[in-house]
């Protein structure tokens, strides 16, 4: 199973976009699945259902940090590399999806009762979220293989 298929499988098990993307890749970087699911758990729904940065995107950002992030004070090269890869990810994600903001991607704010209802009624989980999870997993997979 490819990593984007694994991410979709996790998403279909009712894990959030962030959990699905992060946990699909984290084990190959030494982080167990349970810890990965817990670490990414607060980022779903655009960060705690606030409709902000898409969970699939934040999951990818965490993976970039896990692989390339700064671990020593003053390591400007690692910090610069991490930020450059985040910008690359965002550019590529926006080419496919026009935005990284959850409420813009969905067209509703799922943190409100009306938005949550519209999310369900319009089938946005399957219409939008499945695509952004797949896109994020494909893009981050390519970035992590660099």
Image (spheres, grey):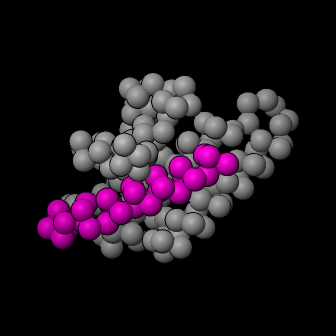
Q: Is residue 55 toward the left or the right of residue 112 in the image?
A: right
Q: Position of residue 55 (x, y in %)?
A: 42, 52
Visible residue check, residue 115: no
Q: Write the residue at 18% across / 70% down.
A: 122
The segment highlighted magenta reads 117-146
The number of discs equals 0
Q: Is residue 125 above or below residue 145?
A: below
Q: Quadrant of residue 84?
A: bottom right
Q: Write the residue at 53% across / 57% down.
A: 139
Q: Write the residue at 85% across / 35% down.
A: 74
- Between 34 and 24, which is closer to the camera in this rendering? 24
> Which quadrant of the figure contains the N terminus?
top left
Q: Write the residue at 81% across / 31% down.
A: 73
Q: Position of residue 109 (x, y in %)?
A: 32, 65
Tell me the chief SS of the magenta region.
Answer: helix
Visible residue check, residue 59: yes
- Between 107 and 4, which is closer to the camera in this rendering? 4
Q: Position of residue 8 (x, y in %)?
A: 33, 49
Q: Is residue 10 toward the left or the right of residue 22 in the image?
A: left
Q: Tell me if residue 76 is in the magenta stretch.
A: no
- Between 104 and 63, which is closer to the camera in this rendering? 63
Q: Tell me if residue 128 is in the magenta stretch.
A: yes
Q: Is residue 128 toward the left or the right of residue 55 in the image?
A: left
Q: Position of residue 80 (x, y in %)?
A: 78, 49
- Between 25 and 2, which is closer to the camera in this rendering? 2
């Amino acid at each position: 199973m490819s990593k984007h298929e694994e991410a979709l499988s996790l998403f279909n098990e009712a894990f959030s976009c962030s959990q699905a993307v992060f946990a699909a890749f984290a084990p190959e970087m030494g982080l167990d699945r349970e810890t990965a699911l817990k670490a990414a758990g607060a980022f779903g729904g655009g960060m705690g259902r606030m409709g902000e940065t898409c969970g699939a995107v934040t999951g990818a950002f965490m993976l970039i940090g896990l692989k390339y992030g700064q671990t020593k004070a003053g390591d400007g090269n690692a910090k610069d590399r991490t930020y450059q890869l985040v910008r690359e990810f965002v550019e590529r994600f926006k080419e496919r999806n026009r935005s990284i903001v959850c409420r813009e991607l969905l067209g509703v704010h799922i943190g409100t009762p009306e938005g949550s209802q519209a999310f369900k009624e319009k089938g946005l989980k399957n219409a939008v979220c499945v695509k952004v999870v797949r896109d994020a997993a494909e893009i981050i997979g390519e970035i992590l293989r660099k």
